Each structure stands twice: as C-alpha cells, then as structure tokens.
Image (tube, rainbow, N blue to C red):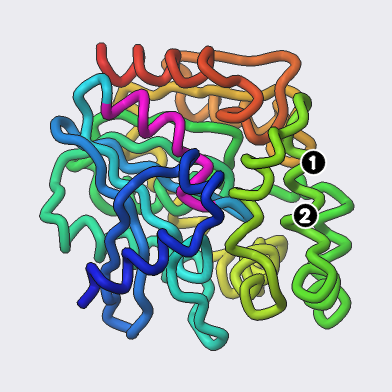
C-alpha cells in the first residue's frame, strides 16, 4: 500500500523537478497517524540528513547523489507538513514531536549507528536526537543552523511570528517560503531548483508547517518549546567529543556568523569550512565545493 502511495507522491512532481530529484520515495505511518515521506538511497554507512524551514528533502538532493556514489546510505525524511509528507492541519507541530518523529523513523529502519547532516531547524531536531542517543552518533555536520537558546532573530522573521497577521502573511501570501528562495542565496537559484523547493508549499493548507515552524521559535521561557530547546542545548555536551564539521555560508541573514561562533564554543575541536560570500542555502550557493567538503569529512 505504502509503495503505491509513494509512487503517486513522487510522480506528482513536475517532470523537470523529478529529474533533479530522481529518488524512489518511501513512507512511514507514524504512531499519530501521519505519513512521513523519506528517501533511503544507497548502501553502506548511514548518513541521516535533516532539513529545516521552508525546505524539504529536495534541498539535500545533490549531497545524496554525491554520498551514494561514495558508498554511503542516505536517509532523508520530510518532516510532517513538509515536502511529500502528509500535511495535517491539526498536528502537534513542536520541536519535541519532530525529534520523536525522526526517532520513530530510525527505529523503523533499525538504524543504530549514523552520521548527521543538519540544516536550519534540522540542527535543533538532529542535535536533540543525538543528545538522546549519543552512542548512536558517529559524525555531525552543521550547516547554517542552531541548536541552543538565542534571542538573535531577524526582525523580518520576528515580525511574522505575530499571531493572525503572521499566519496570514505566511499561509495566504506565501510570505516566508517565497522570499526564502530568493534571500537564502547569493547566486540566484535556477528556475527548476526554485520550483522544486517551493512545489510542496503551493496553498494555504500546504503551508501549515511553514507557519508552525515560525510559531515554534521559543524566544521566552513561557514558550511551549523553550524547555525542549534548553534540553537540546544541554545535550550538546554529550556529543562534543564526536567528529564535528561546521559548513557555513557567512552571508546568512538568519543563522549568521554569531551562530557559527556559538557552536565553536560548544565544539572547540570542530572542523570549519566557511564560505565568505554564500548565504543560508549553503548546499545551493556552495555547490560542489560544499558537497565535496562534507563528503571528505564523512569519508575520513
């Protein structure tokens, strides 16, 4: 049954996007009833890649191709509400639920040793996962992300956290995913890539998770996710002895170099690859240089 579901999910992509993203998909029925879509490509040591907002597994497509060629198995989920996963309107769209969803996927696939590549919200989700299961983590690659409490939020994002107004701007006007496809890169995306990144977020109902990710940014102690993020931050100490790589676009308007410097405090021995002229979507802006840096780090 799931196989049939998936063929239709992937085949709905526009033909040119499908060429960019040629993977066979899979789905997992989560305990709460939502179907989570993921790609599982290649054989060998496992690399789990976790996207943020407003992207999906498509963001990692080129890195997946590179890593599969290098003899790795790549497992890349679409968080619920994102990509080709279900988009329930009444889901518990919180950081703790995101961590549990990825745990469910790893348990389902019986994966007990893996490396992580995380971007944007994927950092908090992945580091939360690693803090819960430090013995399972082999290596960690951090791409323009955060996994600790911070008041550093760009005004343009803070402005759309406002209830009602923010939800309208993001869901009715596509005022987050749309601009992100332009602002997150210094080299404009090819039309097919922009179309691929935005394809799952074409309507009000499609953008439910885009809004909820923004809503879930905890700026105050009273926020429902503040405690979870505190636990994620405290868990960083448990993985500080692992091989860690920071691959950073220095021109990121959101996860700026101050986030990079904060990670260096947590992980002083981390290897660093900084791209001075690249933006938030470092795998797009950085291209082959970024992919090959990650490949070399995970291979050695």
Mark 1 — residue? 182
Q: Where's the C terminus, which quadrant?
A: top left
For the residue pair 32 and 189, the one nearer the viewer reads as 189
Q: Which residue does the image show at 41% across and 40% down from the upper left?
A: 236
For the residue pair 227 and 50, the one nearer the viewer reads as 50
Residue 140, above or below 268: below
Q: Is residue 60 left or right of residue 204?
A: left
Residue 63, above or below 165: above
Q: Cα distance, mark 1 to mark 2?
A: 7 Å
Q: Is residue 139 left or right of residue 204?
A: left
Instruction: Report helix, strand or loop for mark 2.
Output: helix
| Main SS class of the magenta portion in the image | helix
Q: Is residue 31 left or right of residue 205?
A: left
Magenta region:
56-68
Counting from the top left corner in percent of width and height, residue 190 is at: 69, 33
Instruction: Report helix, strand or loop for mark 1.
Output: helix
Q: Which residue does the image show at 45% across and 30% down from the upper left?
A: 62
**Farthest front residue in view:** 15
Q: Residue 120 has which mark?
A: none
For the residue pair 233 and 215, the one nearer the viewer reads as 215
* Residue 79 figure quarter: bottom left
The reply to whether the magenta stretch includes residue 200 is no
Q: Which residue does the image show at 81% across and 56% down from the upper left?
A: 157
Counting from the top left corner in percent of width and height, residue 285 is at: 65, 25
Label 1 neighbourhood size at 10 Å, few (<14), some (14-19), many (20+)?
some
* Residue 2 figure quarter: bottom left
Mark 2 — residue? 178
**Farthest bottom residue in view:** 90
Residue 225, above or below 266: below
Q: Is residue 291 left or right of residue 156?
A: left
């Amino acid at each position: 049954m799931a196989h049939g579901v998936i063929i239709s999910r992937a085949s709905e992509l526009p033909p040119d996007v499908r060429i960019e993203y040629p993977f066979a998909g899979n789905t997992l029925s989560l305990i709460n009833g939502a179907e989570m879509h993921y790609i599982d490509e290649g054989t060998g040591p496992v690399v789990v890649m976790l996207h943020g907002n407003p992207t999906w597994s498509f963001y990692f497509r080129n890195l997946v191709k590179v890593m599969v060629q290098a003899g790795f198995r790549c497992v890349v989920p679409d968080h619920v509400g994102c990509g080709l996963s279900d988009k329930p309107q009444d889901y518990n769209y919180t950081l703790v639920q995101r961590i549990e969803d990825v745990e469910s996927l790893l348990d389902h696939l019986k994966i007990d040793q893996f490396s992580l590549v995380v971007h944007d919200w994927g950092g908090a989700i992945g580091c939360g996962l690693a803090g819960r299961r430090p013995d399972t983590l082999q290596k960690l690659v951090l791409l323009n992300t955060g996994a600790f409490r911070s008041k550093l939020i760009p005004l343009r994002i803070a402005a759309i956290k406002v209830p009602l107004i923010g939800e309208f701007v993001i869901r009715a006007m596509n005022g987050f995913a749309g601009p992100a496809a332009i602002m997150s890169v210094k080299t404009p995306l090819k039309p097919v890539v922009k179309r691929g990144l935005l394809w799952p977020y074409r309507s009000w109902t499609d953008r439910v998770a885009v809004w909820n990710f923004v809503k879930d940014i905890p700026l105050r102690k009273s926020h429902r996710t503040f405690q979870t993020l505190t636990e994620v931050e405290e868990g960083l100490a448990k993985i500080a002895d692992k091989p860690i790589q920071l691959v950073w676009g220095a021109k990121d308007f959101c996860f700026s170099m101050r986030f990079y410097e904060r990670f260096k405090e947590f992980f002083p021995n981390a290897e660093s690859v900084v791209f001075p002229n690249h933006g938030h979507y470092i795998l797009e802006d950085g291209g082959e240089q970024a992919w090959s840096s990650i490949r070399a780090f995970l291979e050695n």
